[in-house]
Image (cartoon, rainbow, N blue to C red):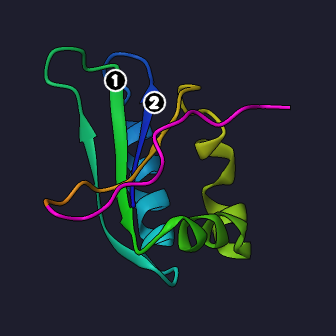
Amino acid sequence: MLVVTRFRGDVGDLALGEQLAEALQVLSTQRGYVRGVVGRNVDDPTLWVLQTEWVGPGAYRRALSSYDVKMRAWSLLGQAIDEPSAYEVVRPGEELNRSEPRQNG
């Protein structure tokens, strides 16, 4: 599972990058974490991304519930741009989940 979480900061605000690096570090210690990176948009330096890969949605959800993540990254993750962020990885020949949006309510 691929998680793409975007953030918007101030121009020249490298502190956001440092906070994202710390969030990545604490996430990387969680069971089910595969890999991740922090990036900044080349055309809009106020736009940042935290991209992580997990063995599955359960591992990601458990990681978000861990004490260390709640203490060191939760407040930052709560500032993410409000948009869907979890994606299944598409590989040739593998069946995808059913293609229908989840309903709130």
Residue occupying the point 35% across, 38% down:
49
Q: What stretch is highlighted in magenta?
A: 93-105
Residue occupying the point 65% across, 37% down:
102
Name the one closer to the observer, 13 or 89: 89
The kind of residue on which mark 1 rests is: Leu
Cα gap from disc 2 to disc 1, whole angstroms: 6 Å
Q: Name the residue under label 1.
A: 47
Q: Position of residue 4 (x, y in %)?
A: 39, 43
Name the one closer to the observer, 47 or 64: 64
Residue occupying the point 74% across, 74% down:
67
Task: Decide whether the magenta segment is chiefly helix, strand or loop.
Answer: loop
Q: Mark 2 points at which residue?
A: 7
Mark 2 Cα-neighbour bin, 10 Å: few <14, some 14–19, many ≥20: many
**Numbered badge on residue 101:** none
Left or right position of 26 against 103: left
Residue at disc 2, secondary structure: strand
Q: Where is residue 28 in the image (x, y as percent from the top left)?
A: 42, 74
Quarter of the picture holding the N terminus? bottom left
Callouts 2 and 1 close, C-beta under 8 Å: yes
Residue occupying the point 54% across, 64% down:
57
Extreme-bottom residue of the structure: 31
